[in-house]
Image (cartoon, helix red, strand yellow):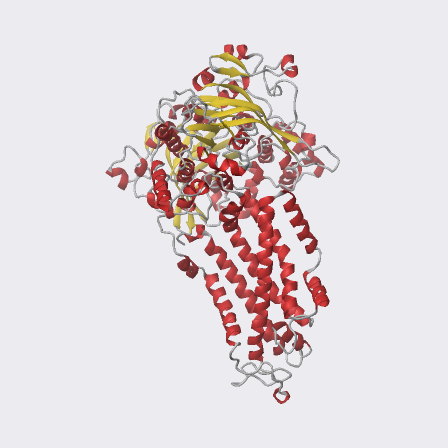
Amino acid sequence: MTLLNVKNLNVILETSEGIARAVRDLNFSLEKGETLGIVGESGCGKSMTALALMGLLPEMGKTTGQIELNGENLLEKSEAEMCKIRGNNLAMIFQEPMTSLNPVHTVGRQIMEPLRLHMGLTKEEARAEAVRLLDRVGIPNPRERIGNYPHQLSGGQRQRVMIAMALSCAPDILIADEPTTALDVTIQDQILELIQALVHEEGMGLILISHDLGVVSENTDSIMVMYGGAAVETGRTDNIFDELVHPYTQGLFAAMPKLGRAREARLVTIPGTVPDLVNLPAGCTFTDRCPLATEICRNTPPPIESIDARHAAA
Amino acid sequence: MTDCSSHVPVLEVTDLVRHYRLPRESLFAKPGHVYALNGVTFQIQRGKSFGIVGESGCGKSTLARNVMALEETDSGSVKILGQEVVGLSFDQLRPLRQHFQMIFQDPYGSLDPHHTVGRIVAEPLAALGAISNAERDRRVAEVLESVGLKTRDVTKYPHEFSGGQRQRIAIARALITHPELIVADEPVSALDVSVQAQVLNLLKDLQVQYGVTYMFISHDLAVVEYLCDEVAVMYLGEIVEKGLTENLFTNPAHPYTRILLDAVPKPGSGKRRERIKLKGNVTGQTERRVGCSFQDRCPMVQDLCRSEKPPLKEVGPDHLAACHFSDKVSAAG
Amino acid sequence: MSDVQSTSFLSRCRRSRSFVVGGLLTGFLLLCAFVSLFWTPGSAYDIIITNRFLPPSSLHWLGTDQFGRDIVSMLMTGTQNSIVVAVVAVSIGLSIGVSLGLLASARRGWTEELIMRFSDFSFAFPAILSAIMLTAIIGPGGVNSILAIGLYNIPVFARLTRGSANAIWAREFVMAARAAGKGRFRITFEHILPNILSIIIVQATILFAIAILAEAALSYLGLGTQPPEPSWGRMLNEAQTLMFLDPMQAIYPGLAIATAVFGLNLLGDGLRDILDPRLSRKR
């Protein structure tokens, strides 16, 4: 059975300026032990997708469609049931570990809390488990570190603590929203490797959200490129970079300075900025910035075409 | 000052040292220090772009603030167009500031939300004093146009612009005095990829148009490679490797540079390339160690590295590296 | 990017509901105070014992007190006293406190230490107690209670100003201004003050309300406005003994104080919104 199956996911946000369609008609699925990368620029809807999966959308947000986890539709669950699912089946790590950790509690206490709450461990058991988890995510001297406050740890170590917390309840799916954006490249390397190893060993599904094509390319099995709230290109990671089909993906790739490329070649830019989600154009959302745009793009939303079995573009 | 002969470097930094004193932990404890800069030396020639690369905590932003004379320097010298700026008072520096300007990282924090764009962009002129309103408006319009904004944007407030456009405003502000040197501290790292490319191209174009010299600070090696003629890699307040961009990136002579280059994820290169991995975090800036600054994390560390500090020595034409075993590192590539 | 033109100050004012309501309430009180200089419906001073405890009528809109004075007239004249005390007291605190705070934040070092230790020192004395002490030394009366309340406001403003100014000094745009060659004095007026003004204004309206209350408290203790001058605090004080005989006597001045405080707080909230250019966008 497919671990996660998302069908026609739509998220709308009721903002003061009108209704913003943050996520439109998203379809994807995820198997155990598989990694899906979601790439896109800010405002493309990738974080909203993650929050919708977690059932953590802000008050003004509404979700329609289907999110099936182990065959059960999460959108039909009550808040209490979602709470349980969040503790046991779904876990999320965020971009900025400093703000996701409570500065006035020790990291040990913050790891132990959900263990005692969700798994009913005693204080000693929870403590032992917390030490094991910290050791697992590669924090040296976990026995001493458990008494540290978040500000006493470095950025990379804080992210490791976040991962330990996410792991504490052995989730089926780990959602990592820009987990390494705030970190240095060498630390990013370590953290991504750790996440990879854990996903492999635990057989979790991983959804890795990033703006960095490089990060996603090296760490995923399949990729979904999002633009203006919708998926514009999806496919197996190996195939997608062989032949970029959607002009946005091509533009994104060309706009990125790449190591080892000579300086003479000027970066190709995508003109303009991301579309306003409140007043989306009738046709393709990329029309205004697309070098290939014609009249038909302006008026009719493009259908999704399968390039081959493992690669599709809109 | 602008007409000095062209062989005088635009910026000459010699043995720059900056140590911050930490607040005492208790009344009787000795105050600790953060050794942010431990003797940094480099020069930038006119019209060139000099990149400074390093991870957080390597002292690159401290270097920017010291070059911009925004804080006290402990020792060493910073010469801009041959003129010493270390030790000058704030008032003495004011007339010189038109020659060196700065672009900041955060396009949201570096513009005063209560000022209009026109006022923000004209700020460096206002500090020079004695300039007519008509002249000021003319220069604001000119500089806004050259960064791709509209003249009628002057009455708007920063919040009405996107991140990329705000960074254009910040660039316009740095350009308005026609400076010789612009210090750019991570100017594109807060921007999306497509917008980042626009801003990088703009910076390149402006260099051609105005002949400005850049000191460009970034953690992103690809960005530095794209924009800079020369690069210095910093680690714990020291330059560990310096050279022309093409030499340094194709043939790194310091293990840290090699690891940094390897750590950058590359799109389309498939899963998990083979590479040297780096253990541990950036070790403390608060302790002074004997020997090489990179010894704690270096995969090829030897006893010599723990006892003797490697000097920054020539490893090729215009290529310096501070490693006892730079031949081995180069050979490995 | 929004292509809506920056709207004018006035139209922004009109759109802020709390500013409008607060402004109307405050304006009404100011009007009462102003009118009472020339005209009151009855007399706030004349004691006519035969008229005591008259119920509301066309002659005495809210009735009379135990000495036969017209309550509406007393409230109107009392507005004068309360507002004068509050305005002057807050102005003293505002001008001295904000200047000290800005100075501390701009100079840092020992200047900051000195100013902050001084303000800590004055914080150690409870406001009302020190006001009582002061009036006990220099004697009771309107002016002295102004001084007492005003002095108490100085450290409040100094602290708030320094704290918020320090946060602004750490921002990048201040660094940019320094890189442009602007001195600390200039940066203080061009960047720091505009960015903390909204916080100061909100605090000022709150302290304004507190000052009215403090004046009422001092008068209630017999240390503020002296008889026969009416003030809201003194009216409350006198009504206290009649609480069960004629409770309305206490409710009227109480309502007046509540109205003033409420109106000023709304006004402050509204002003804060209006002064923020980010809120000038379409809403």
Q: Residue at x 55, y 69 (%)?
A: C259
Q: Is residue C101 above or below residue B94?
A: below
Can residue A2 be seen in this snapshot? no
Q: Residue furthest right?
A: B28
Placement of the C terminus of chain C among the 4 image quadrants: bottom left
Placement of the N terminus of chain C among the 4 image quadrants: top left
Q: Is residue A6 above or below residue C252?
A: above
Q: Residue furthest left?
A: A295
Camera-side residue of A25 and B241: B241
User: Residue C85, how many percent across, how many down?
Assistant: 60, 67
- Tally the numbered discs: 0
Q: Is residue C78 above or below residue B84?
A: below
Residue A230 falls in which quadrant of the image? top left
Residue A229 falls in which quadrant of the image? top left
Camera-side residue of A222 and B117: B117
Q: Is residue A29 left or right of residue C232?
A: left
User: Residue A214, how many percent across, how many down?
Assistant: 44, 26
Q: Is residue C200 left or right of residue C282?
A: right
Camera-side residue of C100 and A32: C100
Can residue A294 be seen in this snapshot? yes
User: Residue B297, how many percent across, how many down?
Assistant: 60, 21
Q: Residue at x 41, y 57 (%)?
A: C9
